[in-house]
Structures are given as structure tokens and as C-alpha cells.
Image (cartoon, grey):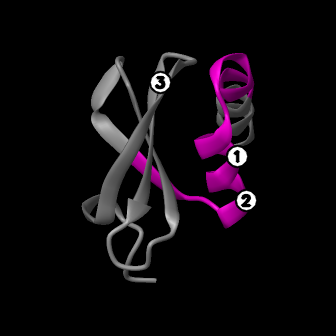
Amino acid sequence: MSCCRYEDFAFLEELGHVESVDWDLGTCKQCGGFLLRQWSEYAPASVYVDRLTPDEGAAFRDSRDRARAVLLKQWYADH
């Protein structure tokens, strides 16, 4: 797929800081799919963008506070 890369990231919302990682929710400028951007304060030059399913994107978008932190920790552990 030629979209859903770092260059295609359109910022929607800052999700917070969990596991020494800053997390942002965005969409792909080309296809509109949800993207999750992450970078660590310990490696600021390394920025990662992962494609999310529509359900994952909605879960991050709709979560708040503790529930969001739990989702982010689970994503970190799984990926």
C-alpha cells in the first residue's frame, strides 16, 4: 500500500504519554484510515506510524483518562 506512511499522517488528537512514549491519533491524508503515531523521549529521531483498524481507531478516539492509558499500554505490549 502506498499510503498510511509517516508523510501521510494528519494529526487528530494527542493521546498522551505512556510507557515513555508520546502517542498521537491521526488519519491518512490519502485514504482517511486511522493512524497511530508514536515516538519516545529516549529516541526522538525514531517516529513510528501504524495503521489502525476502524474499530481500534474509534476505541482510541472515544477513550479518556484511565481507559485510554490501558489501551495504549496494551497496544505497546502487543506491538
Q: Position of residue 18 (x, y in %)?
A: 56, 19
Secondary structure of the residue carrying tag 1 is helix
Q: Amino acid at mark 2?
A: Asp
Residue 23 placement, left or right of 30: right
Quarter the C terminus occupies? top right
Q: Which mark is residue 55?
A: 2
Report the residue marked by disc 1. Answer: 59
User: Looking at the image, which is closer to me, 42 or 3?
Assistant: 3
Determine the secondary structure under disc 3.
Answer: strand
Could you say which disc has been placed on residue 21 in the image?
A: 3
Circles 1 and 2: CB atoms closer than 8 Å: yes
Q: Quadrant of residue 74?
A: top right
Q: Position of residue 67 (x, y in %)?
A: 74, 25
Q: CA distance from mark 1 to mark 3?
A: 19 Å
Of discs 2 and 3, which sits in the foreground? 2
Instruction: Name the residue: 74% across, 41% down.
Output: 78
- Residue count near mark 3 (Cα–Cα under 10 Å), binned few <14, some 14–19, many ≥20: some
Whichever of callouts 2 and 3 sits on the residue coming sooner in the sequence is: 3
Read off the magenta span: 48-70
What amino acid type is highlighted by mark number 1? Ala
How far apart, in angstroms, are the residues tagged by discs 1 and 2? 6 Å
Q: Residues within 10 Å of mark 2 (few under 14, many from 20)?
A: few
Q: Position of residue 16 (x, y in %)?
A: 49, 23
Query: Image height check: is 20 above or below 50?
Result: above
